[in-house]
């Protein structure tokens, strides 16, 4: 008998575990992987000459509008929590574009002819969607309405289609509402003006996140520290462990069969907190859910990723933490230079690149070998002047399933029905990006875990669905170390 069972040691599950530990609650945490951290884990590679490189699963900076979370993390890693000045760019048609936008630089790059077309298209969109009330039916409509056709296609529609592998006119407007709500031409111009005039900090708030916090040994340090603290407190962290059956009766979870490093174990928890993708979770239920719920869950699709990490005999490539590549002829979507997060991510005088390829499990990119991906990568990086093939020390291949939930134009219908079914279970809390089928940020997953734990502690269920639903641009943040979730 356990008070609580937690399935999944990603940010959400570990935040729940830490909060339960603070309250002196009894629980066991099970994680399918051989390490904690989920999508925010940090990998460590020691090479034949003894040099060690670290990398996250892409850029994982920390910012939040919730001051409590800053204190939560500072209390864990203390002096290993550093502030980093952000530099991020996009690479389009052979030129770099600052982000947040630098209007003078952007105008010089695109030239007066294309700039004039962007302005004309923006004015036309204001008439079409504003004055004449053309309905906004999908993501493509949203970005065209707010930026005009030419600018929307320049770096939004193409990159979005590259990420999701589907056409922008098949993506729900909720994707735009959730990720870029409030972002517009006017917003970007205002932010650029405030930055130029030195007004980008007002009462601790930021219009765009110009700096962020980062654990100096990788974002996984947060989650490795939590795992150690909860284990030291007597709550087991079982790796390479996962549920094979979840029993329920009268709208309550009544028992689990868990594979713990290959050995089956029976668990009877009072409460279950989990971050398993709903389609997979429903398949574990005994009795099985109604056929209509199973059919709805089958429609919940995800975009997968393949990662290539290359270590380099080079001190630095750029000063960017990460660079976007919206154009579809370039096979990778984003590169991350880990040294620009923290100098402790690579040995002195060396650097590294983490490259992200968006794909579907089983397609050509997913099945590509490390050597094929490296060859594909260097065909672009070398001519663009990023690095030479002779500077590559080692390369490492990683694959990750179910990274991005796909918000197609019908997703709310089937997702809402699945969530309504799961909400019937009185002692179940489903959390995190995978658990709630929500493309949220790291801070939102932490907040979900904390709220689930507090629901267990107080007996009053908190509204986890509301986390990350603010109707404003996700790149807003604040500084501070006090407050409440």
Image: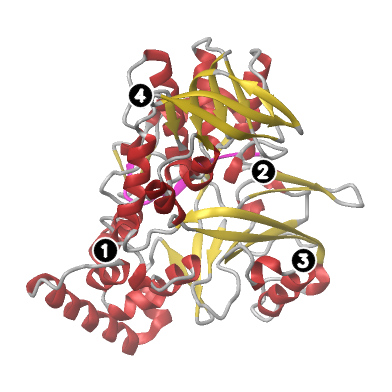
The answer to whether residue 107 shows anywhere in this view is yes
Q: Are marks 4 and 1 in contact (CB under 8 Å)?
A: no
Mark seen at residue 184: 1
Mark seen at residue 370: 3
Mark seen at residue 42: 2
Helix, strand or loop at mark 1: loop
CA separation in Å, label 4 and label 3: 45 Å
Mark seen at residue 484: 4
CA separation in Å, label 2 and label 1: 34 Å
The answer to whether residue 212 shows anywhere in this view is no
Residue 111 among those drawn in magenta: no
CA separation in Å, label 1 and label 3: 40 Å
Kindly identify the residue that appears in the image at 70 percent across and 37 percent down. Answer: 35
Asked whether, in this view, residue 210 is left or right of residue 259, the answer is: left
Q: Quadrant of the C terminus?
A: top left
CA separation in Å, label 4 and label 1: 31 Å
Helix, strand or loop at mark 3: helix
Pick whichever of labels 4 and 1 is earlier in the sequence.
Answer: 1
Q: Are marks 4 and 3 in contact (CB under 8 Å)?
A: no
In the image, farthest residue toward the left: 131
From which residue to which does the magenta span run?
A: 205-216
Pick whichever of labels 2 and 3 is earlier in the sequence.
Answer: 2
Of residue 273 and residue 25, the one placed in the foreground of this image is 273
Q: Position of residue 20 (x, y in %)?
A: 51, 17
| Residue 302, above or below 432 | below
Q: Position of residue 151 (x, y in %)?
A: 33, 76
Asked whether, in this view, residue 25 is left or right of residue 232, the answer is: left
Of residue 352 and residue 367, the one placed in the foreground of this image is 367
Q: Position of residue 340 (x, y in %)?
A: 62, 53
Its colouring scheme is secondary structure
Kindly identify the residue that appears in the image at 28 percent across and 81 percent down. Answer: 118
Helix, strand or loop at mark 2: strand
């Amino acid at each position: 008998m356990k008070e609580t069972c937690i399935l999944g040691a990603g940010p959400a599950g570990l935040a729940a575990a830490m909060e339960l530990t603070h309250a002196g609650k009894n629980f066991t945490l099970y994680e399918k992987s051989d390490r904690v951290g989920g999508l925010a884990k940090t990998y460590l590679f020691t090479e034949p000459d003894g040099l060690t490189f670290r990398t996250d699963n892409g850029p994982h900076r920390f910012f939040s509008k919730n001051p409590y979370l800053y204190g939560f993390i500072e209390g864990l890693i203390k002096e290993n929590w550093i502030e980093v000045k952000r530099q991020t760019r996009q690479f389009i048609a052979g030129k770099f574009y600052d982000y947040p936008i630098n209007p003078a630089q952007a105008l010089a790059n695109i030239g007066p002819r294309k700039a004039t077309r962007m302005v004309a298209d923006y004015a036309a969109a204001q008439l079409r969607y504003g004055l004449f009330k053309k309905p906004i039916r999908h993501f493509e409509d949203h970005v065209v309405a707010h930026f005009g056709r030419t600018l929307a296609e320049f770096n939004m529609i193409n990159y979005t289609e590259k990420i999701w592998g589907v056409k922008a006119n098949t993506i729900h407007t909720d994707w735009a509402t959730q990720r870029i709500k409030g972002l517009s031409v006017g917003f970007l111009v205002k932010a650029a003006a405030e930055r130029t005039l030195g007004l980008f900090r007002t009462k601790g708030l930021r219009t765009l996140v110009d700096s962020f916090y980062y654990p100096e040994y990788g974002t996984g340090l947060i989650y490795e520290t939590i795992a150690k603290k909860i284990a030291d407190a007597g709550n087991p962290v079982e790796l390479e462990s996962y549920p094979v059956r979840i029993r329920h009766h009268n709208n309550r979870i009544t028992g689990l069969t868990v594979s713990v490093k290959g050995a089956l174990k029976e668990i009877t928890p009072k409460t279950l907190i989990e971050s398993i993708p709903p389609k997979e979770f429903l398949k574990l239920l005994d009795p099985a859910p109604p056929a209509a719920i199973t059919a709805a869950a089958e429609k919940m699709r995800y975009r997968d990723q393949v990662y290539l990490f290359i270590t380099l005999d080079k001190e630095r490539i750029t000063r960017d933490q990460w660079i976007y590549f919206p154009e579809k002829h370039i096979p990778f979507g984003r590169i991350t230079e880990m040294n620009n997060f923290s100098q402790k991510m690579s040995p002195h005088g060396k650097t590294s690149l983490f490259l992200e390829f968006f794909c579907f499990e089983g397609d050509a990119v997913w099945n590509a070998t490390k050597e094929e991906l490296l060859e594909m990568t260097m065909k672009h990086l070398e001519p663009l002047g990023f690095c030479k093939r002779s500077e590559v020390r080692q390369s490492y291949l990683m694959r990750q399933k179910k990274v991005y939930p796909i918000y197609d134009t019908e997703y709310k219908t089937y997702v809402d029905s699945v969530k309504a079914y799961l909400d019937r279970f009185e002692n179940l809390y489903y959390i995190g990006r995978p658990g709630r089928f929500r493309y949220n940020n790291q801070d939102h997953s932490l907040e979900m875990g904390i709220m689930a734990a507090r629901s267990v502690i107080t007996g009053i269920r908190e509204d986890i669905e509301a986390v990350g639903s603010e109707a404003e641009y996700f790149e807003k943040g604040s500084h501070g170390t006090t407050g409440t979730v």
